[in-house]
Amino acid sequence: MIKRPLLIGIAGGTGSGKSTVTKEIFKAIGEGNITIIEQDSYYKDQSHLSFEERINTNYDHPDAFDNKLLIEHLSDLLEGKSINKPIYDFENHNRKKETIKVEPNDIIILEGILILYEKEIRDLLDIKIFVDTDSDVRIIRRILRDMKDRGRTLDSVIVQYMSTVRPAHLQFVEPTKRYADLIIPEGGYNKVAIDIIVARINEIINNHS
């Protein structure tokens, strides 16, 4: 392992292709060298709220995330310590009791819509990436994902998108683009951008090994 892990942040709106970019980097660099942390795992525990109240939580607002725990875990990984990453249940809108043990690695990728919003998180990142994709593509991807993976109905996804997701994107997510070192149009389908990122990662690893 290199002296200090390389921490890469991949931000962008819902359905922008952040996960695809992460997977392409993962494939190019190699499974044994990368640890992936999803910001979605760090939604706040809501055990004190009723199910109806949890449904009405705005999950695209910065206040929905347990950034204190996320920063603590990122710091531990950067120091070479393992963490117990939370698991979020999107059907019950709450954090599970179980956790996943995650080991540090040469490269740590933090992926999420608002990872560039908090200065304390930005300051930990070595490379800051923003995935920029047209809104019509993003909403279609969100509909497909939420219906398939999160047990949502079409109506509920559309209502949530119009009432909270879109306003939050314009207010909180889109402005963080200015903090990015690299903006990737079209996400993981932009092979040139992926190749540039992978080359830079390999360069840093080789210089620090």
Image (cartoon, rainbow, N blue to C red):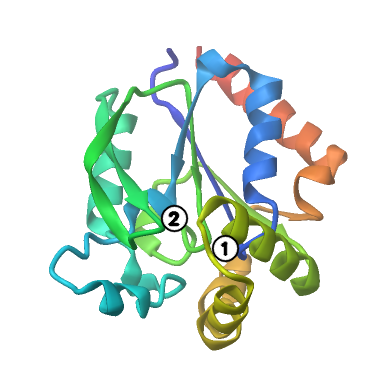
Left or right of residue 209: residue 145? right
Q: Position of residue 17 (x, y in %)?
A: 69, 52
Q: Is residue 147 visible?
A: yes
Task: Indicate which disc, 1 or 2, sits on the residue closer to the N terminus.
Answer: 2
Q: Is residue 123 visible?
A: no
User: Mark 1–mark 2 contact, CB under 8 Å?
Assistant: yes
Find disc 2 in the rendering and name its residue.
122
Q: Position of residue 37 (x, y in %)?
A: 43, 40
* Residue at the spot 26% in from the left edge and 71% down from the top edge: 51
Find disc 1 in the rendering and name its residue.
179
The one nearer the camera, 57 or 127, is: 57
**Rendering quarter of residue 136:** bottom right
Res. 153 mark: none
Q: Is residue 145 above or below residue 79?
A: below
Q: Position of residue 176 (x, y in %)?
A: 56, 69
**Rendering quarter of residue 159:** bottom right
Give, as a three-letter code, the residue at label 2: Arg
Quarter placement of the N terminus: top left
The one nearer the camera, 140 or 178, is: 140
* Residue at the spot 59% in from the left edge and 25% down from the top edge: 204
Give, as a three-letter code, the residue at label 1: Tyr
The one nearer the camera, 170 or 14, is: 14
Question: Distance between the Cα atoms at labels 1 and 2?
Answer: 8 Å
* Residue at the spot 18% in from the left edge and 73% down from the top edge: 49
Neighbours of disc 2 within 10 Å: few (<14), some (14-19), many (20+):
some
Q: Is residue 209 above or below residue 162?
A: above
Left or right of residue 65: residue 192? right
